[in-house]
Image (cartoon, rainbow, N blue to C red):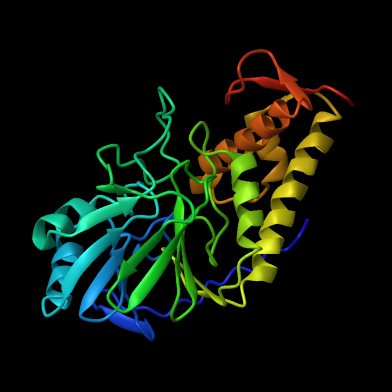
Amino acid sequence: MTMIFHLKEHEFVYGKLESVAPGIRRLTARNPSAFTFHGTGTYVIGQGQVAVIDPGPLDSDHIQTLVEGLSAETVTHILVTHCHLDHSPAARELKAHTGALTYGFGPHGEMTKGESEPVEEGADLDFMPDVRCAHGDVINGLGWRVECVHTPGHTSNHLCFALDDPSALFTGDHIMAWSTTVVIPPDGNMTDYITSLEKITRRTEPTYWPTHGPPLREPLPYVHSLIRHRQERIQQIIQQLTKTPQTVPELVAALYQGLDTRLTGAAGRSTLASLIHLHDLGQVSCDSQPDLNSQFTLTHP
């Protein structure tokens, strides 16, 4: 299995809008978890007239610190990578304070019915961007320019934002240095996720700024390792199914030995996403529509 060398060292300060690169500032929310690492990193690009990327959770202290930190400047744009509860809810409050429009791909996609086990931070179903952005759209501000890069997989509406100067890519949850990305069907899609990773390998930004955790410098080898990791995990699933038909929990027990129990549900959903990918390719079948309770069989042992 390809080793992914995650970066756990992360220099940050809670409660401070800190400069992390020329023209880039970050404020880290106090919402640490198994899925957010130390918390949501809200980014500010530009000077004087600025854009805010991923305003974060509905946390009054975080929003107040952000507004006060930018009180001498004008927020002209609010950019949202996707609408999970740790990324987008503060956009409404920030818009109310500043009047800036929100920009994003669109609202959240298809929801799973009857989910009871928390496996991510949850969806912000109230989010609807004022301006809907498509892949390749360009957003211009005073002294900065951003290209929208549609990267479905983690969610169907996930965007990365490519800053021109300094050249950098804000990757949301699509690519993170500290962890792999959770892919939860039906809105999360493994085929789309791998395709989106491959799309990123054709870009040239030297630094990635994920919404959680530290930046990635010289990131392309890391992205290639993520692709290989997912492809090898899919091959492991196929190998397990050559032995006997199995369910998602059986596959997780075999493939994720020693996993943090808080992440068992997420591993199950990512495994299901890989199985749906194989099902769509006709390589596995199951006794019903693919879900967590299905028994999966290899069609061509």
- Quadrant where the N terminus sits is bottom right
Give the side of residue 79 with respect to residue 134, left or right: left
> Image quarter for residue 247?
top right
Count of numbered circles in the view: 0
In the rendered image, the residue lying farthest to the right is: 301
The quadrant holding residue 30 is bottom left
Residue drawn at (21%, 55%) of the image: 101
Taking 289 as reference, is 108 left or right? left
Residue 63, above or below 46: above
Tell me: residue 136, above or below residue 238. Answer: below
* Residue 143 image point, x, y percent: 31, 79
On the question of residue 134 being in view, the answer is yes
Q: Is residue 42 visible?
A: no
How far across and down, in percent of the image, does residue 270 sit?
59, 40
Say which of 236 and 92 sits in front.
92
* Residue 98 image position (x, y, % from top left): 12, 63
Q: Residue at x 28, y 66 (%)?
A: 52
Q: Please state which of residues 76 and 29 is positioned toward the viewer in this rendering.
A: 76
Q: What residue occupies the far bottom of the structure in this picture?
A: 22
Residue at figure coordinates x 36%, y 61% from the top left:
32
Q: Residue at the spot x=60%, y=17% of the render?
A: 289
Image quadrant where residue 285 sits: top right
Quadrant holding the C terminus: top right
Residue extending farthest to the top is 287
